[in-house]
Amino acid sequence: MTALELAEKIKQRQISVLDGVKTVFAEIEKKENRIHAYLDIYKKEAYARARQVEKGIAEGIYTGPLAGVPVAVKDNICVKGKKTTCASRMLENFVPPYQAEAVSRLEQAGMIVIGKTNMDEFAMGSTTETSAYGITRNPWNTDHVPGGSSGGSCAAVAAGEAYLALGSDTGGSIRQPSSFCGVTGVKPTYGTVSRYGLIAYASSLDQIGPIGKNTADCAALLEVIAGRDPKDSTSLDRKDLDFSEAMDQKITGMKFGIPKEYLAKGLDGEVKNSFMEALKILTGQGAIVEFFSVDTMEYMIPAYYIIASAEASSNLERFDGVKYGYRAADYEGLHDMYYRTRTEGFGEEVKRRIMLGSFVLSSGYYDAYYLKALRAKALICQEFDRAFEKYDVILAPAAPHTAPKIGESLKDPLSMYLGDIYTVAVNLCGLPAISVPCGMDSKGLPIGIQMIGNRFEEKKIFRSAAAFERGGRD
Ligand code: GLN
């Protein structure tokens, strides 16, 4: 059952809110020791809240399309009074006295937060293997990773351990694990969802977004969490947030563009075949599909990793053993306390990013690396702007391959970074994009196709993704 179907049945009084909650906890009990999607589970609170929501629905307080639906939240998004660790030892015991705006909106919509999901430490990674609290396994094949960094959220939805989940996407962390887990995930236009209460990785790129079983569920959840929030100065006052409106429209005559360089070297053959099959489904519905050329592809990964690491090194300065979380037990003086706290509190990948980021921002290298990365970003975005003059939607694979085996990726971080080739430009340019399942490889692992829209054109990607789902069924 999808989240919208569950909510409809609740509304019709065929299922109680408590039954819906019980169903997910039954799945969690059955599967968690194998999958480990969650870092924290709120069973008692969820049961109590279910009764309260049941009453609220009966009294007409909660009238929205997702009222009564259980939802999981990535552990870098603050839930007031609940541990929020970012899967880091550094925040092992951090209990925020405030709540993310996105979570407050879930509650206002009558949804039930059931727990916090595993992730790469501070959202840095592509596999959920950099978590300080153990790996998450891919529900389709537990020898493989679920992707990352929102691997816990995507695995939870794929395994039926959640109807819906929130993730965060800085360079692909919603779309790539969605594709690896065979679920649907959306990275909204920058500024659409408040970042208040999302623990910052790279502030100019971070967005919270929905993960669900299909496009309609994601559109409904994005409607719940989107909107202007005065607590986040980068959040926008948009008037076009009725995404579900777009779901039934046909795509006849819509123009889709594909950067032909995206399909050249580095793309797995099975992923490519499945992508080409997906194009047939779109053209079968009257869409126009064309290839075009991009010149900036080779700059995407370097520009992203320089900018993201630079911002991360600055954002993570606050974790110094004084203000938040972990502090080393033994130290001699202030500087040694900083040194030991950060040495012990952060994992390898986070330290790598902090060092890279500090380096590219240091005087003497700032112009050569950071400023150059900003210039490359401007060129990349100009190319996308030009493409959107011609095309409604840009298509790309979500990732160059399906989910790798556990233990294979971290040995060679640089080649892991290359796996983000199809997702990072979207964040650099603030664009919205959705990843939808489009097939399976011969090992039985899911493949995803990415639909990228121009800024504020979520409706076009929801419309395209919904048409694609319908087309795939026929
Ligand atoms: N894999 C990318 C990184 O490690 C993206 C992470 C993300 O979107 N949070 O930076």
Image (tube, rainbow, N blue to C red):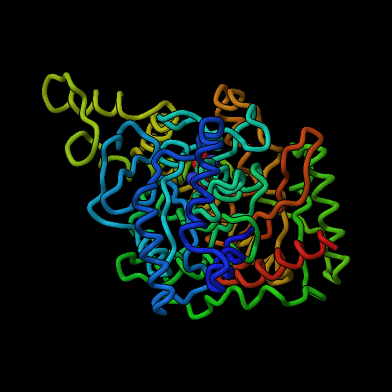
Q: Is residue 8 left or right of residue 320?
A: right
Residue 357 visible at all: yes
Tell me where residue 158 appears, x and y as whole percent: 62, 46
Name the side, left or right, on which 328 lies relative to 258.
left
**Position in image of residue 361 (x %, y %):** 37, 41
Q: Nearer the viewer, residue 18 or 64?
A: 18
> Where in the figure is residue 265, as x and y percent of width and height?
77, 38
Question: Residue at position x 70%, y 38% from top?
Answer: 402
Q: Residue at x 44, y 63 (%)?
A: 111
Q: Is residue 455 visible?
A: no
| Quadrant position of residue 395 | bottom right
User: The N terminus lies in which quarter of the figure?
Assistant: bottom right
Residue 446 location (% of width, % of height): 72, 43
Q: Quadrant of the C terminus?
A: bottom right
Q: Residue at x 43, y 40 (%)?
A: 309
Q: Using residue 98 as the reference point, say whether residue 309 is left or right of it.
A: right
Residue 348 appears in which quarter of the rendering? top left
- Which is nearer the eye, 457 or 83? 83
Q: Is residue 62 above or below residue 320?
A: below
Q: Number of marks in the image? A: 0
